[in-house]
Amino acid sequence: MTAKEELARMNANSAELRKIQRAIDLFATQMKIRMENKFVEEGFTGWDNPAYLPSIRSRLQRKAAKILLNQDYPLDVIDIANFAMIIHFNENDS
């Protein structure tokens, strides 16, 4: 591979990484907004209590089933991501 080809490949990879990072940042912002709304509107607490993990897993499965059934629930993907974050936090925070 020539230096010019290598530079083009690196630039393409860099552009792709920026797109990935932007997509993740936008999605994370939506997750934060959804969690904040749940807290403000419904007083959603206890997410950081490992005792609630079975319930959280169950809720995640129900939301995922809706998506698999092709039902149109645009917030469900955000909810699923938040449930996954909650599970990850509780299983890895010590």
Image: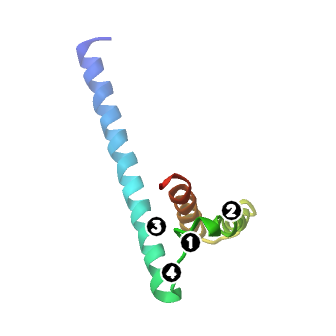
The residue that appears at 33% across and 33% down in the rendered structure is 12
Q: How far apart are marks 1 and 2 (CA)?
A: 11 Å
Q: Name the residue under label 1.
A: 75
Amino acid type indicated by mark 4: Lys
Name the residue: 29% across, 18% down: 5
Question: What residue sits right under mark 3 in the picture?
Answer: 31
Dot 2 falls on a residue whose secondary structure is helix
Q: Earlier in the sequence, mark 1 or mark 3?
A: 3
Give the Cα distance between marks 3 and 4. 11 Å
Q: Are marks 3 and 2 in contact (CB under 8 Å)?
A: no
Q: Nearer the viewer, residue 27 or 40?
A: 40
- How far apart are the alpha carbons under marks 1 and 3? 10 Å
Measuring from the top left, give residue 56's x and y in whole percent: 64, 67
Question: Do residues under tags 1 and 2 come within 8 Å of each other at their CB atoms?
Answer: no
SS assignment at label 1? loop
Residue located at (56% from left, 71% from top): 75
Q: In the rendered structure, which disc, 1 or 4, sits on the residue that comes first in sequence? A: 4
Sequence order check, earlier mark of 3 and 2: 3
Q: What is the residue that sits farthest to the front in this orientation?
A: 94
Quadrant in the rendering for residue 29: bottom left
Indicate the amino acid at tag 2: Ala
Q: Residue 44 at what x, y percent from top left? A: 53, 81
Q: Distance between the residues labelled 3 and 2?
A: 16 Å
Considering every residue shown, the one lying at the far bottom of the view is: 41
Q: Do the residues labelled 1 and 4 touch (CB within 8 Å)?
A: no
Residue topped by disc 2? 64
Could you tell me how far apart the alpha carbons at marks 2 and 4 are, in whole angstroms?
19 Å
- Asked if the residue at tag 4 contacts the one at tag 3, i.e. Cβ–Cβ closer than 8 Å, the answer is no
Select label 2 or label 4 by which is in front: 4
Residue bearing the label numbered 4: 38
